[in-house]
Each structure stands twice: as C-alpha cells, then as structure tokens.
Image (cartoon, rainbow, N blue to C red):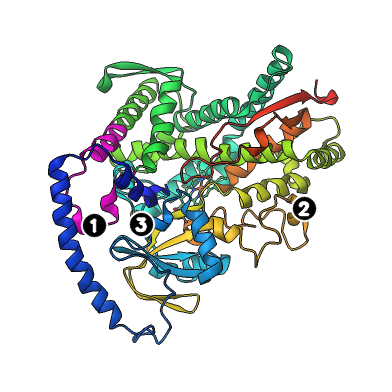
Amino acid sequence: MNAFLHQFLLFHNNHTTSMPSMICFLLGFVVSSFLFIFVFKKLLSRHNMSEVSGLPSVPVVPGLPLIGNLLQLKEKKPHKTFTRWSELYGPIYSIKMGSSSLVVLNSTETAKEAMVTRFASISTRKLSNALTVLTCNKSMVATSDYDDFHKLVKRCILNGLLGANAQKRKRHYRDALIENVTSKLHAHTRDHPEEPVNFRAIFEHELFGVALKQAFGKDIESIHVDELGETLSREEIFKVLVHDMMEGAIDVDWRDFFPYLKWIPNNSFESRIQQKHKRRLAVMNALIQDTLKQNDSDDCYLNYLMSEGKTLTMEQIAILVWETIIETADTTLVTTEWAIYELAKHQSVQDRLCEEIQSVCGGEKIKEEKLPLLPYVNAIFHETLRKYSPAPLVPIRYAHEDTEIGGYHVPAGSEIAINIYGCNMDKKRWEKPEEWWPERFLDDRYELSDLHKTMAFGAGKRVCAGALQASLMAGIAIGRLVQEFEWKLRDGEEENVDTYGLTSQKLYPLMAIINPRPSSS
Ligand code: HEM
C-alpha cells in the first residue's frame, strides 16, 4: 500500500522505453522546464509565513530543480530516509516528489494531530496509479475517502468480520491455525531434527487458510477459473490474490511524480498492473460463484456483504472480500515472523516468557482467554509492532482545505505522508528505539488492554479495523510457539534483517532451529 514512492527508480531502470515515448518524454521535459521556472519564480516571491493563518510555513528539505528530493529517496526505504531527515529538519517538513509537494510527519504528536484533531481537513486519500487500479478506484475500506461508501463498508467489515462479536464467532478458525502450526512444527522436529525450519512457509499457509475461511466459509484446495480457462491450485490462488498484489502495490509509474505528463503512455506499467488486476478479479469471481453455488457457508464475509451491502456492485463486493484476504494474510505474518526472529535471538526473553506462561497456565496450553493475564506476551507483541511496524508509511492523505499541524500552516492541496516507522523510532519518545526490548511496555504507564501503545495501527477515525484480530492471532502464536518450542537462529540468520521493498516484511524467510520443550510433548 505504501509503494508509490519508488516510481522514480523504475524511471531510471526502465531499459525497455520505446522511441516514441522517449520523444514524448523529451518534449515533456522541455515543457516542464518552462513550468518549473514559472513555479520557481512564484516560490521566490513567497513569504515563509502564511498570509492567511499567520503561521510559519512547513520547513523544506532542499532538493533539485524539477525532480525535487526524488534522487535522495533512491535507497528504496523512504520511511528510513524520512526518519533521518527528521533529525535535521524536525518532526514535520515538506519535500518535493517531482512536481508534488509532500508534508511528512514523523512524530506521534504531529501524526495524531493529522489523524485525529485535524481529521476533518485531511480525510481524503491520494493514491498512486498502481493503487488506483488495484483498489478499483478506492473500493477498499482502507483506501476509500471518508464518505458514505466508507461508512457503509467500515460498518460491514466490523460487524461482519473484525469487531469483537464477529471475532468471537470466528474463534474456531484461529484455534485451528495454532493447532495446525504447532503440529507441523512438531512433525518437523521428529522428521528433520537437525534441520532449520522455514517458519514463514508454515505460518503463511495456515494464515491464508484463515483468510479463505473468513471470506468464503471454507479453505480452498483449487478452483477452476472460467475467465482464464485454467484450474488454479491453492498455491497459485495465493500468488494471484496476495503475492502478485503486494508486488503490484509497489510497482512504479514515474507519471505519478509528474501528473502534467500523464498523457505520455507507459505501456509496460499499464500492462503489468492491468494483468494482475484482471487475474485477481477473475479468481475472486470464480471463488464467489463457487461459494454462492454451494450455499453452505452462511457465516462468511461474502454472504454478510451480499445481504447487508445491498447498494454495492458485485465488483465492489469482490474487492471488499479480497481486502480481508490480503490484510489477514500479510500484516499478522510480518509481525509474528519478526517476533519469533527476536525471540530466537534473545534466549533470556524466551526464559522469562516461559516462566510467565507456566505461572498463569501451568501445564495447560495457552488459550485466548489467558492473554489478558500475560503482560509479557502483550509486551513482546507491542515491542515487535513498534520496531517492525507492518505499515511503515500510511497511504498518503490529502488536505482538502487549509489546516495547521505542529504549529505550521499546511495549505489546501498538500499531500500528507505519516511515517509510522519514524513515530515508533523517535528518540525523544522511546529510549534506545533501535533496541528490541519488550520490558519497556511493562511500565505502569501502559494499559494491558490498550492496542494502541504505538502508532502501528494508526489513530482516529481511520484506525486499523483488524487490530483485535491481529493481536489475538499474533499473541497466541507468540505464547504457544515459545511454550512448546525452544527457538534458535540458524548460523548467519541474525544478519538477515533486510526487508522486502518498502514494506517491513522480512526479505528472507526466518530459518530457525527448534527443539520441543519437555512439557509440550
Ligand atoms: C499487525 C497487524 C496490522 C497492522 C500493524 C495494521 C496497520 C494498519 C494501519 C496503520 C492502518 C491505518 C491506515 C490509515 O490511517 O490510513 C490500518 C487500517 C486498516 N486495517 Fe490494519 N493493520 C494490521 C492488521 C489488519 C488486519 C488483520 C486487518 C483485517 C483483516 C486489517 C484491516 C484494516 C482495515 C480495514 C483498515 C482501514 C480502516 C479505515 O480506513 O477505516 N488490518 N491498518
């Protein structure tokens, strides 16, 4: 979802650019140079105080003419670059991404101001070209503007799937997930005791199963897709619905940075995105038809939307059901994988966790009811979310009227990037933020039941709708996996901390050596 910042790199790396589009581009360059001189003159004549509000203008990170700060962002981890800049320019500053201005917020205070206090002025989204296609023009809850459509679909997703009552009804899916994961891990220790286990492969498979059961009432082994004329296996369905979509979301279209050049074709980008989008819709349509035909999955999200979302089109329903699949399959995996990585690295944390679990559960396996009695599990979950926020940058918001953030004037038309990673790594707020140290959340200042100890789930009216589900699944996984196994990193694994694209997902799947604990057999 946060992929739009890298399009400039493609612009540099795209060796397949055709001759006519090169000519178009050169023409565009000349036109844009004139435009730039015009805009630059205007900027020079501006005061750095707003004449309307009397507030100072947001500090500016110096960049180059025409492309602004794009070259400085080429290392592919914009959230990290933004965080470094915040040490020089403060928690709020503005940058130029080609011709667009972006106000970047890097502290909990400024982020909350934008998400809560000033929400009425900053409630719309600004999507990249890739996301506009992949979200069917904002047909997802998470990417829609704050309008009647959003209110309807947010109510549906909470009542039908993610709210506390709905999550109680889906409890058996989560219980099955952890039973399946632990029994596969036990089987691994029996069959290949010396070999490292690929934790992601096992957890991802089960999580996708939960996503499918919530969406369609059942796990799916294969599906025939008439529109594609082929039968897809479960792995292929995962690729089309999750993997290709994650890849598409971070695809690049340089025209995002130069909207006045949008008349120049970018055929390779268009065909890549359209192909992914069409395959996803074809597979969703096949899964929907299959579920409706069987008529035996009453308590699934598809049926809920069909009965409660009467004004929605079938395409919107397909996207809204798909949204729950990709959100379930991705963020909880990212959090749990990093939590297990850190636990495997810190034996003393595993020991302390085992003691807590033993004193609360005795010989019983941890159940969800016990989570409120296990502050250390809770602290490990939140510390992992802080250090590895699965959504390091919130999809861009847009100020539709003049507003104020952090004592600065933010003019109408500004795009706003909220750097959650920056908020959670802010040295003024967190002691030694680079360190993974769950004990920080055992402090009396933090309520055990508060899901928002960090900015990882956002804040205000657009706060994450899936926070409860994520905390239940990741909390139980952290507890059960350490209750039943001793974890160690395989040699060389500690250095594998790189992340995939702009996301926080671990680039290489976690490979760990596991031993069953004596009490778990
Ligand atoms: C650790 C796991 C998760 C994290 C860190 C996370 C993070 C976030 C963040 C930061 C936002 C706010 C975006 C914004 O303000 O613009 C958000 C929104 C949202 N999340 Fe999550 N999420 C997680 C898990 C989930 C899950 C499992 C689901 C559903 C199955 C989900 C569904 C949603 C939805 C529907 C929204 C949009 C809410 C709205 O716009 O009103 N999330 N999430």
Q: Is mark 3 within 8 Å of ligand 1?
A: no
Q: Secondary structure at mark 2?
A: helix
Q: How far across and down, in percent of the image, does residue 380 sit?
A: 71, 46
Can see residue 473? no
The CA span between labels 1 and 2 is: 47 Å
Magenta residues? Answer: 252-278
Report the amino acid beneath label 2.
Answer: Glu
Q: Is residue 298 left or right of residue 374?
A: left
Report the amino acid beneath label 1.
Answer: Pro
Residue at the spot 28% in from the left edge and 63% down from the top edge: 66
* Residue located beneath label 3 in the image: 145
* Residue located beneath label 1 in the image: 259
Please tell me which residue lies in front, 376 or 148: 376
Q: Is residue 71 left or right of residue 199?
A: left
Q: Secondary structure at mark 1?
A: helix
> What number is the disc on residue 439?
2
Instruction: Name the quarter where the C terminus is drawn.
Output: top right
Q: How far across and down, in percent of the image, does residue 155 sit?
A: 44, 50
Q: Are marks 3 and 2 in contact (CB under 8 Å)?
A: no
